[in-house]
Image (cartoon, rainbow, N blue to C red):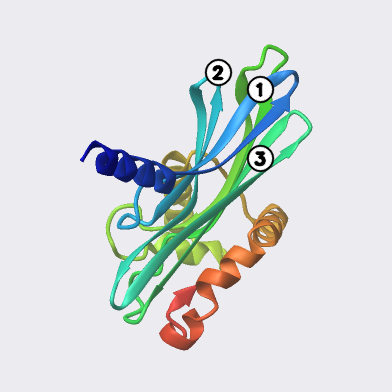
Amino acid sequence: MKIIYLFIFLFCWIKLVGQTSEVVIKDAKFKFVTTKLNDTLQKDFIVVYKAKKKVLEHIIYHSDGDCSSENLQLGTYEIKGAKIILYSYWAGADRMGKNMYPFGYKKQTYIVNSNGTIALEKSIIYVEDYVDSYEKPKAINYLYQTPKNAKERNELKRYVAEIEKIYEGNFVTGKELDKLAKEVNTKLKSEIKEHTSSWKEIYEVNCKL
């Protein structure tokens, strides 16, 4: 019986903890571990450890929804010199055309200091999402067309401030958005294709990609 329990424990542990890689940045050793919560939650993480202490956590896959809708979050990372860069992508689809958010991009840049500590250097975002209810905020329209009056400008300002608070980053538009979207789409090209290639066939126009 003990052998059976041991086998079950090892099997579960293998499912929960996947690939592990060790990286040295500025003479500090970091361990990057791919972690799955479980199959039901459908959420995978990259967890970064330094001396057995968790210093960063980043979602690389999360999907939820029902028989008529799906919300997707994808992520990846890269190491450039003394920097750890995290990328995130959100997309949604709904046959009823109501639950297509969040949609957007995020890039977080962390720098490893000379003493081995990690500090957030920059976080930029562009996210369309519900902020007060499950109805699309009118302010999202003003991301595509210039606000016509003070009321609309204030609505957009409040929306951006709320998104920056929720997603912890500086909201970008225009050329900065184009650059962010291109970079995230490039970094996650294969993952986006894998998980959304059938969306237009299934959901027709009711999807945000």
Residue indicated by mark 3: 85
Label 1 vs label 2: CA separation?
Answer: 8 Å
Label 3 vs label 2: CA separation?
Answer: 20 Å
Q: Position of residue 184 (x, y in %)?
A: 65, 56
Three-letter residue code for mark 2? Ala
Residue at horizontal 59 percent and vertical 72 percent from the top? 193
Rendered image quadrant of residue 84: top right
Residue indicated by mark 2: 51
Residue at horizontal 25 percent and vertical 40 percent from the top? 5
In the picture as drawn, the residue positioned furthest to the top comes out as 115
Three-letter residue code for mark 1? Lys
Q: Is residue 117 visible?
A: yes
Residue at horizontal 36 percent and vertical 57 percent from the top? 130
* Sequence-first disc among 1 and 2: 1
**Circles 1 and 2: CB distance less than 8 Å?**
yes
What mark, if any, has residue 29 been given in the picture?
1
Label 3, secondary structure: give it.
strand
Label 1, secondary structure: give it.
strand
Label 3 vs label 1: CA separation?
Answer: 17 Å
Q: Position of residue 107 (x, y in %)?
A: 62, 45
Three-letter residue code for mark 3? Ile
Assess disc 2: are there few (<14), some (14-19) or many (≥20) residues with their C-alpha within 10 Å of its C-alpha: few
